[in-house]
Image (spheres, helix red, strand yellow):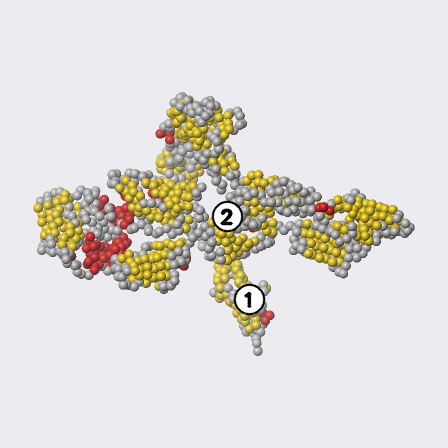
Amino acid sequence: LHEPIKRIQNFISAFAKKPKTQEAEEGSSVVFEAETEKPDAKVKWQCNSKDITNGEKYVIAADGNKHSLTIVAVCKEDANVYAVIAGSSKVKFDLKVVPKPGVSPDGPKESGAEPEQASAQPTAAPTPEEPAAPSQDAPPAEEAQPPDTRQDLTGLFTEKPQSGEVTVGENITFVAKVSADSLLKKPTIKWFKGKWMDLASKSGKHLQLKETFDRNTKVYTFEMQIIEAKANFAGGYRCEVASRDKFDSCNFELTVHGDSTDGNEDSGELDFSALLKKRAVQTTAEPDVDVWNILSHAPPSEFEKIAFQHGITDLRGMLKRLKKMKKEEKKSEAFLKKLDPAYQVSKGQKIKLAVEVANADVEVKWLKNGQEIQPTGRYIFESVGNMRYLTINHCSLADDAAYCCVVGNEKCTTELFVKEPPVQILRNLEDQMVMKGERVEFVCEVSEEGANVKWEKDGVELTRDESFKYRFKKDGCKHVLIINEATKEDCGHYKVKTNGGESMAELMVQEKQLEVYQSIADLTVKAKDQAVFKCEVSDENVRGTWYKNGVEVKPDTRINISHIGRNHKLTIDDVKPEDEGDYTFVPDGHAFNLSAKLNFLEVKIDFVPRQDPPKIHLDCMGRTADSTIVVVAGNKLRLDVPITGDPAPTVIWTKGEKVVTEGDGRVHVETTKGHCIFTIEGAERQDEGIYSVVVRNPAGEDTADINVKVVDVPDPPQAPTILSVGEDSCVVHWDPPAFDGGQPIIGYVLERKKLKSYRWMRLNFDPYPDTTYEAKRMIEGVPYEMRVYAVNSIGMSRHSPASQPFVPVAPTSEPLGLCVDDVSDTSISLKWRRPERIGSAELEGYGVEYCKEGTDEWIPAIQGLTERTSVVIKGLATGDKLQFRVRAFNMAGPSAPATLAQPVTIREIMQRPKIWLPRYLRQTLIKKVGETVNIVIPFQGKPRPKVTWSKDGEVLSPQFASVRNSEVDTILFIRKTERHHSGKYDLQVQIENVEDTGAITLQIVDVPGPPEALKIMDVWGFNVALEWKPPKDNGNCEIIGYNVQKADKKTMEWFTVYDQYRRTHCVVSDLIMGNEYIFRVFAINLVGLSPDPCCTKDSVYIQKTGIVYKPPSYKDPDFSEAPKFTHPLVNRSVIAGYNATLSCSVRGIPKPKVTWYKNKMDISHESKYRMLSKQGVLTLEIRKPCPFDGGVYMCKAVNDSGEDVVECKLEVRPLDL
């Protein structure tokens, strides 16, 4: 609205005194006075842009430079906008008419509204020196619209920007904070002024936008800083933050106190809408009459005619303004207070919507998405005086809708947003280890039924696919991820996410490996004895087959095959000599077998005398007196020892001095004719030892010792200890078990579990031989426990006690930027920055150490740890040369150290080193080849600093450039520059470990090389088209153009066609007919022309045109198209004996060749079928088909561009009589 006034300010006002807006009672008279600068100025008075003349109503008077307008007998119709015009100056003012005291205004409500509307007009006329307030006929401004009032819908802000006040020329900062705990990705933020202007494009001298992230608190901080505020920066602002499907916004105000003292400088910095207003004023001329009043009472069909008459060209802007005027004039008569634009409520809470109506007795209707709401237990209607309430109890997502309150023909609307509380994970996922092909189910429970969750595998979201590999199941609060037939590719970390948390678990899939707990053993039996082969495998569901000498063994009356759990047994009763052989057990589905041999023992009895001394025949059992019999603990040991002697000897078994007696005990003996049997039922460790057997008869005695060794699984190891932890790993150690079970320890099996879980996961399937193991693939920050099993040849021990809980966490990275801040004779000040990677463990502090030069002993500089990133170390000896290092500590221990580049001498620096780089060296210094470079750079520092020049990381050599240093400056001197002198030169001024650096960039330029590949592209009439390529050598600077020259071969005089030509192609015109030309091109850069040009290889002869007509050539268009069936064949069922037809349509260019097939056999030449083709419609007629004619019919269309096939099924049904 101020743009017309700004335009008028460029002119000199013709008025010394301007008329003011006045109020007058009905029936009275009112006088408006004005004074002009010139006494002879012509003055004209207007009412509603129409000229006023002297009469009974209006009296116009003039006395020198004083002018007046008197309105007699004021009435309501005189309340208008008046104006006085002198020269190019025009001043507007208002007349407000008020009724006489005690008299109520009559007339309709519309007329009663006019004084209120008039009262809103400006109280001072718009003048060049005194801007006026917006008037009714001023065009609507963009900033007049209120800022977006949407309230925060999801509550992303932890701290919202607050409204503020600032004085002109001062700074102010608005801060917004967003928590990243519940966000899946980084939020994006936008700052707006007013309703639509995005401030991201306005960053510059007066506006700075900043963004930071705190890794500890996981909070994003966004700042908008306004620098040197101006008066036009005031207004409404809005901050919007979004992250995927979440959105939040906040409105705030800026108030600027004081007047702008710098005119219109930067006036549009933050108020771009002013430019739009200026453009609107320039395109819409100021009418001489009240056009808006005319338009508001005219029909829409007359709008264009009226705009043309009064010079309005912006018809769209005119219609927008009329629409807004009508909205402003239309005031609500039914509502005193309407609903807010939007409301927000948390799910499960209640909310009350309130409106205030003008009539206390009026009835209201409440609508939801256009449908009337009926009062129920959840929807409660209340009427209290002029207030009407709608209460919604236990809000759900179904209540998220648009609501409307209707009173008669008027209504007000609002939107209700139901905010869901974050869904928490109540039961976490558990790690699983399955065999290949098994079904896997990951189960979690959330805090709300029907909540949406997202499943991920190694960071990739899982979805339902066509193979149904993954299935997702919901059961109330329980969510299940099902993997059918797990494979090795399914190994990884699975994660479930909600908007309130996440949980991760690991899946390990192993190949099915069958373990043999007990193998079958060789047997030696005698006739009519029983032979039992027994084995035990790890999977009780595995079946198998027994073979004898490669032939499958079938059960019968003597042979029994049994499978109970993990045990497989083959029993042969009444053994015969033909039973001798190799027996093999083959598990189904596994590529290995177990074999053993059955030896048949044939006892030969020779005739002996009656008196035969007893004899123990251990050699018949394949054993000697030194043999050891090994039995697995828990198994049965049965020794059948053959004995001979006549008369039958007596047998005594002893272990040590204890005699083993016959009976039903666990260890017992039995004597039969020719045998003594020793049996141990369920061998135990104490059964181990040497057993002696003594046989006696009158003829003598015999003894034998049998060594029995009982082997068992090892004892469980002691609880393992955690030696160290990493980011996702740990190193665990344990001691071997106290008893190895009588067999050497093959290795160990380890298991781990999360502390809050009940599922143990095996880390290795093959026994691990060492007692120190590094476990990997753990989740950082999650507590775990470990336990160990010992394994020998017999089996696996019970598990050890669980280790102490531990948390995988890695040390932090090394601190950054360690440097010396200050140094004195007895102290030094160090500073550094936080490590780049902290990890999940909290940073406990920093440890600072120093070491004297020449030694390896690091001495702590401070007691304990410091949480600060700087430290002052005192009490050092003057003159010592010390090296310092800093390490960060967390739960996992110290990080890698950050060490100073070189030792520091402990002595005070009187003046810190500082480089004073001249202003002209802060930009690239350009020199030509051969010129001299003499650069002087002053510096400061006491004692005298060490000065180092380097280029590209290497110290300058005296042969490359000369350097002279003094106590206060340094000089870089190059006598004769070359191209290789270009580059960045670094200057370092150093006193001990305190340094300052500077850099200069030197660019040595030379003339460019010639352009390349100059070609004559075309010749027509008197014109030649040339094209070339840029030179390979640009002289180390930009090519700024080309010089194109031509020469007639007769004279060979060169003339410039184009100079400083930027492109690499041109057209040379105005050549002379009959002459022959050659061309050349020079490249131009900052130094000058290239020494050599690039010339055309051929010349061009300009012929006389118009002698020979060369007709243009046209390329025939290719209309070819591959065949394509536009209507397919349709499956049909017909009755035998009646003609049947199959039809389809095809298109293709050229016309395709059509072939019909039945059951893939060509039927083109069979008389039973007739093929028709008309306009692309193909028909196959089958004459009187029989059931044999049923089958699959195919139509194939082929041309040069391709082919297409369509087929159908034909069923021929017999005729039912």
Q: Residue at x 73, y 47 (%)?
A: 687
Residue at 85%, 50% in the rendered image? 649
Q: Residues within 10 Å of mark 1 (few under 14, many from 20)?
A: some
Q: In the drawing, does residue 1066 fall left or right of residue 626?
A: left
The one of 1146 and 25 positioned closer to us in this rendering: 25
- Toward the viewer: 27 or 1160? 27
1150 over 520 or under it: above or below:
below
Is residue 777 at least partly visible in the picture?
Answer: no
> Which tag is nearer the camera, tag 1 or tag 2?
2
Whichever of callouts 1 and 2 sits on the residue coming sooner in the sequence is 2
Residue at the image point whose x is 72% and y is 55% from the top: 569
Q: Farthest residue toward the top?
A: 966
Quadrant assignment for the C terminus = bottom right
Q: Is disc 1 placed on a helix, strand or loop?
A: strand
The location of residue 1071, given as percent across then percent down, is 36, 40
Residue 575 x, y percent position in the rendering? 79, 56
Query: Which amino acid type is marked by label 1?
Result: Lys
Q: Position of residue 949 (x, y in %)?
A: 44, 26
Q: Secondary structure at mark 2?
A: loop
Q: Which residue is mark 2?
A: 459
Q: How dense is the environment of label 2, judged by Cα within 10 Å: few (below 14), some, or many (20 and up)?
A: few
Q: Nearer the viewer, residue 96 or 524?
A: 524
**Does residue 321 appear anywhere in the picture?**
yes
Quarter of the view holding residue 299: bottom left
Inter-mark Cα distance, 1 to 2 = 49 Å
* Identity of the residue furthest to the bottom in this view: 1217
Identify the residue position indicated by label 1 in the image: 1209
Q: Residue furthest left?
A: 63
In the image, residue 941 above or below residue 79: above
